[in-house]
Image (spheres, rainbow, N blue to C red):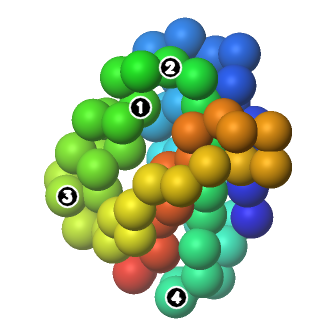
């Protein structure tokens, strides 16, 4: 699943991540696509605090930054 947060300012990409985590099953991936530069720090920090796996960053089809999380619980 991919969340389109391209136009959302900080801290909304992480809030959307938290809101939609349960939309995927345990073990599945959820990606946050965001132009917000703080998301590069916020998403991994959120994963550490919430004990979820930060898989890493890559890019969406349009070149926008994408941050990938695996749901662990």
Q: 10 Å neighbourhood of mark 4: few (<14), some, or many (≥20)?
A: few
Dot 2 or dot 3, earlier in sequence: 2
Helix, strand, or loop for circle 4? loop
Dot 4 or dot 1, earlier in sequence: 4
Dot 3 or dot 4, earlier in sequence: 4
Cα distance, mark 4 to mark 1? 22 Å
Indicate the quadrant where residue 62 lies: top right
Q: Are marks 1 and 3 in contact (CB under 8 Å)?
A: no
Q: 10 Å neighbourhood of mark 2: few (<14), some, or many (≥20)?
A: some
The answer to whether 54 appears left or right of 22 in the picture is left
Residue 11 vs 67, above or below: the answer is above
Disc 2 target residue: 36
Cα distance, mark 1 to mark 3? 14 Å
Disc 1 target residue: 39
Residue at the spot x=69%, y=25% of the render? 6
Name the residue nearer the viewer: 49 or 44: 44
Cα distance, mark 3 to mark 4? 16 Å
Indicate the quadrant where residue 10 lies: top left
Helix, strand, or loop for circle 2? loop
Residue 58 in view (yes/no): yes
Q: Position of residue 34 (x, y in %)?
A: 60, 31
Name the residue nearer the viewer: 23 or 32: 32
Dot 1 or dot 3, earlier in sequence: 1
Cα distance, mark 1 to mark 2? 6 Å
């Amino acid at each position: 699943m991919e969340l389109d947060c391209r136009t959302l300012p900080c801290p909304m990409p992480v809030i959307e991540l938290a809101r939609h985590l349960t939309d995927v099953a345990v073990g599945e991936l959820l990606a946050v696509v965001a132009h917000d530069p703080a998301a590069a720090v916020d998403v991994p920090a959120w994963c550490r605090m919430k004990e979820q796996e930060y898989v890493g960053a890559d890019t969406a089809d349009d070149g926008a930054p994408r941050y990938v999380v695996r749901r662990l619980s």
